[in-house]
Image (tube, grey):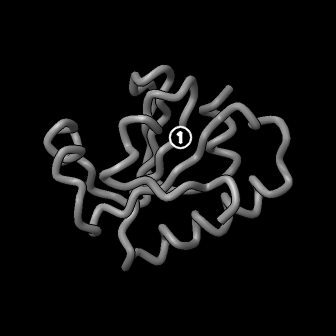
Amino acid sequence: MGRLEIIDGSNWRGFMAAPRAVLILAKTTCQHCADWSTELGAFLDGDTRLAEVRFGKMYLDKPGLADFKRGNTWLAEVDDLPFNLLYVNGERRKSWPGGGVDRLLARLE
């Protein structure tokens, strides 16, 4: 998966505390999530502009995320997956559903 890290119950706090991090919320059974991961992974393999940004994917249907879910009550309002979040120094700055490199780049600018 290259630069797209798998985020789980053991590493989500450190990931989100990075200077700039994009977290993708997904489920293992979501085809749109898999498609977005493939598209983003291909983009990141050839990208040098976003080297300082960490990218991660969290599978919401995997065990071990109770602390994450309790600490992020807004999660109950997420209806569509994949769901992307931009964190800057641990603070959630932007969020949006769906995929697309162009949409991602627009939000990172």
Residue 58 pos. (x, y %): 40, 57
Q: Of helix, strand and loop, which one carries label 1? A: strand
Q: Residues within 10 Å of mark 1 (few under 14, many from 20)?
A: many
Residue 3 pos. (x, y %): 67, 53
Q: Which amino acid does label 1 sit on?
A: Val
Position of the C terminus by quadrant: top right
Residue 107 pos. (x, y %): 60, 32
Residue 46 pos. (x, y %): 85, 54
Position of the N terminus by quadrant: bottom right
Residue in the image at 53% along x and 72% along y? 34
Residue 53, picture quadrant: top right
Q: Nearer the viewer, residue 98 or 44?
A: 44
Residue in the image at 85% along x and 41% along y? 48
Image check: 69 left or right of 34?
Answer: left
Residue 4, picture quadrant: bottom right
Please give the residue where the numbered disc 1 appears in the rendered image: 22
Image check: 4 left or right of 90?
Answer: right
Image check: 65 left or right of 49?
Answer: left
Q: Which of 10 and 22 is in front in this view?
A: 10
- Is residue 32 shown above or below 78? below
Residue in the image at 49% along x and 58% along y? 6
Residue in the image at 57% along x and 28% along y? 20
- Is residue 49 shown above or below 60? above
